[in-house]
Image: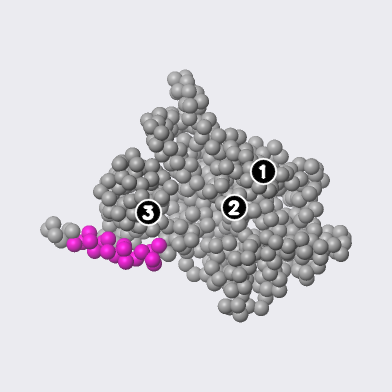
């Protein structure tokens, strides 16, 4: 099969926009809690639909009083917090367009977004963000920003006060001005090369995709459901979940520091989660390392194997009695404790951004949490395809959501079409034309396949496929995902483009490494400089790579690797906000290391001959 389409489950009137999702909630269930605000650690207070709408209206009126006009661009630069979504809806109620800025953005990135979008007002979270915007504006001599307001402090209260003179009729005129076809937000992609591209997503993208997604996920996202957002709201993945939760009436909490996530899950007790695969890998690895540290590593491994076997049997349609019995025992001993670490109520999770891997998917399903892997990009408003409770296939990224279609081009590239696909890039008609086929399919740049039931599987990124000197095509993700799943591996980058063989750069995980070192009798405070050359660690990583190599041909296998002292992080510029590798930046900063790796290998061969 090379094409699969799912008809829309919901038809939406063209004059509606994203604010109507909130209006509907207020009309149907004004007292339903749409948000939980954390006023102090462990203490949450509910915000009802009517209370949220009232504050949205007050801030929108303030923006109107400040001179924000229909179609103006307004930026939010903040961590994931309640006020992010509050301001997002207020901007829409004022008839304006939201332009997210990551809180970690550099002055040059901030300046580019402001200049390209012609941002009129910026909401910055704290003083350091205000200074960053000021510096960006001054460096590039920008004169478009008329208002720079700080979220923390008194600026929002003053904005509410200034809007008191704006009447409800004026606000309603602004709120209802936009239609489905109009731009709702401009999200700048975290591209690996060149300046970010501004994806113009419409109200149609959010409204039609949200309502059609709810039709497929109604047992997960509904008025009795809840979630905690910790992925940056500047990223389309968290942004879509935020909007779809409002559309469904689900309650949302926010946490800006992932270090507090476990504690926040324990007090908020969500029913579903969204995360990138690295988060699930860390949950698994942390549990495994803790079990081994407590002398229960063998029990955990048996429990993990049982969970995977149970999930595979369930997916096949029959779980043997003996396996059901063993699974029930481990549920009390192990699985229930893992679920408790996620708050105790989580039954489903949504994963996107990169491949989760079938083993982890089966493990979490086996412990009672179905991880519904999906696929999408900024240009598809996040999910183009997703597994659902009724139609899930672990290892695949699901079928298209209603109203969308997937097609596989002759070269293997995944093409998308439907209510989720954006209209184009801001100020770049050349790129827009380049990224769409003549018959309107969006070229994702990813490579994959469709099975006979319409489930999509991702096999690689077209632009990331390596071609060795011998002409062998290598998909790095197939190896990287397997190696990165090891407990002490943090990140891995497979290299070899134009080289005689495939190699890899590997970094170690500072969170799980101390327990592993203790088991091996190695001092936990050993400097990383020594650890990356330690024979025990090198031998372990080699065994991990050997196992990964079994899944590919010899020509595609990793022959050499180097352990790096420094990890790849968002702050270092080597990871995107969704924790994907910025391959070009890694190659730029570690190009000499890669060249030395191949030079050493060549010298070793010469010495042997």
Within 10 Å of the Cα at label 2, are there few (<14), some (14-19), or many (20+) other Cα atoms?
Answer: some
Q: Which residue is mark 1?
A: 43
Which is in the foreground here, disc 1 or disc 3? 1
Single out the residue that lies furthest toward the left. Answer: 609
Q: Foreground: 235 or 441? A: 235
Residue at 76%, 45% (x, y): give it.
48
Q: From this viewpoint, is residue 453 visible?
A: yes
Distance from the alpha carbon under mark 1 to that under mark 3: 37 Å
Residue 196, image x, y percentages:
54, 67
Mark toward the start of the polypeptide (1 vs 3)? 1
Q: Is residue 511 above or below residue 294?
A: below
Residue at 32%, 56% (x, y): give it.
529
Name the disc covering residue 256, or none.
2
Residue 415, image x, y percentages:
53, 55
Q: Secondary structure at mark 2?
A: loop
Magenta segment: does it hold 82?
no
Secondary structure, magenta segment, majority class? helix
Q: Is residue 555 above or below residue 326?
A: below
Q: Secondary structure at mark 3?
A: strand
Q: Which residue is mark 3?
A: 507
């Amino acid at each position: 099969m090379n094409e699969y389409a799912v008809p829309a489950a919901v038809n939406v009137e063209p004059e509606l926009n994203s604010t109507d999702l909130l209006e509907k909630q207020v009309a149907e269930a004004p007292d339903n809690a749409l948000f939980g605000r954390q006023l102090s650690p462990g203490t949450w207070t509910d915000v009802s639909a009517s209370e949220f709408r009232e504050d949205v209206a007050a801030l929108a009126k303030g923006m109107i009083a400040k001179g924000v006009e229909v179609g103006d661009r307004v930026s939010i630069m903040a961590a994931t917090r309640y006020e992010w979504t509050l301001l997002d809806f207020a901007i829409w109620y004022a008839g304006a367009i939201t332009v997210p800025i990551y809180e970690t953005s550099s002055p040059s990135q901030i300046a580019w977004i402001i200049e390209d979008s012609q941002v009129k007002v910026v909401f910055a979270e704290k003083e350091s963000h205000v200074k960053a915007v000021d510096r960006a504006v001054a460096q590039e001599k920008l004169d478009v920003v008329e208002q720079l307001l700080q979220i923390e402090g008194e600026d929002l209260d003053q904005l509410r006060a200034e809007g008191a003179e704006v009447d409800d009729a004026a606000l309603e005129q602004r709120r209802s001005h936009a239609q489905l076809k109009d731009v709702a937000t401009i999200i700048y992609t975290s591209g690996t090369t060149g300046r970010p591209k501004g994806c113009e997503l419409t109200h149609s993208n959010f409204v039609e995709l949200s309502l059609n997604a709810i039709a497929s996920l109604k047992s997960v996202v509904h008025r009795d459901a809840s979630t905690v957002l910790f992925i940056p709201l500047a990223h389309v993945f968290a942004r879509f979940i935020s909007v779809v939760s409002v559309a469904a009436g689900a309650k949302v909490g926010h946490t800006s520091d992932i270090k507090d996530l476990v504690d926040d899950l324990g007090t908020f007790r969500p029913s579903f989660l969204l995360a990138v695969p690295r988060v699930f890998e860390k949950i698994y690895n942390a549990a495994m390392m803790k079990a081994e540290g407590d002398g229960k590593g063998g029990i955990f491994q048996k429990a993990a194997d049982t969970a995977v076997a149970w999930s595979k049997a369930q997916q096949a349609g029959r779980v043997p009695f003996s396996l059901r019995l063993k699974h029930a025992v481990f549920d009390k001993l192990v699985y229930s404790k893992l679920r408790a670490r996620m708050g105790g109520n989580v039954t489903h999770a949504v994963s996107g951004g990169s491949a989760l891997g079938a083993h982890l998917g089966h493990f979490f399903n086996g412990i009672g949490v179905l991880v519904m892997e999906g696929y999408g990009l900024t240009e598809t408003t996040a999910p183009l395809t997703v597994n659902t409770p009724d139609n899930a296939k672990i290892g695949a990224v699901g079928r298209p959501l209603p109203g969308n279609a997937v097609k596989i081009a002759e070269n293997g590239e995944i093409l998308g079409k439907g209510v989720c696909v954006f209209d184009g890039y801001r100020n770049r008609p050349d790129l827009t034309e380049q990224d769409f086929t003549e018959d309107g399919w969006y070229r994702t740049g990813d490579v994959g396949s469709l099975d006979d039931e319409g489930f999509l599987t991702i096999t690689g990124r077209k632009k990331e496929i390596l071609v060795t000197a011998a002409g062998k095509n290598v998909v790095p993700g197939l190896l990287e995902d397997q190696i990165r799943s090891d407990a002490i591996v943090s990140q891995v980058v497979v290299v070899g483009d134009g080289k005689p063989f495939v190699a890899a750069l590997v970094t170690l995980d500072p969170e799980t490494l101390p327990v592993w070192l203790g088991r091996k009798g190695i001092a936990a405070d050993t400097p990383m400089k020594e650890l990356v050359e330690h024979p025990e660690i090198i031998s372990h990583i080699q065994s991990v790579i050997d196992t990964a190599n079994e899944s590919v041909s010899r020509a595609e296998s990793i022959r050499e690797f180097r352990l790096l002292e420094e990890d790849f992080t968002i702050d270092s510029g080597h990871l995107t906000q969704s924790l994907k590798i910025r391959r070009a930046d890694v190659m730029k900063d570690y190009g000499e290391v890669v060249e030395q790796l191949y030079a050493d290998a060549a010298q070793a061969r010469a010495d042997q001959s």
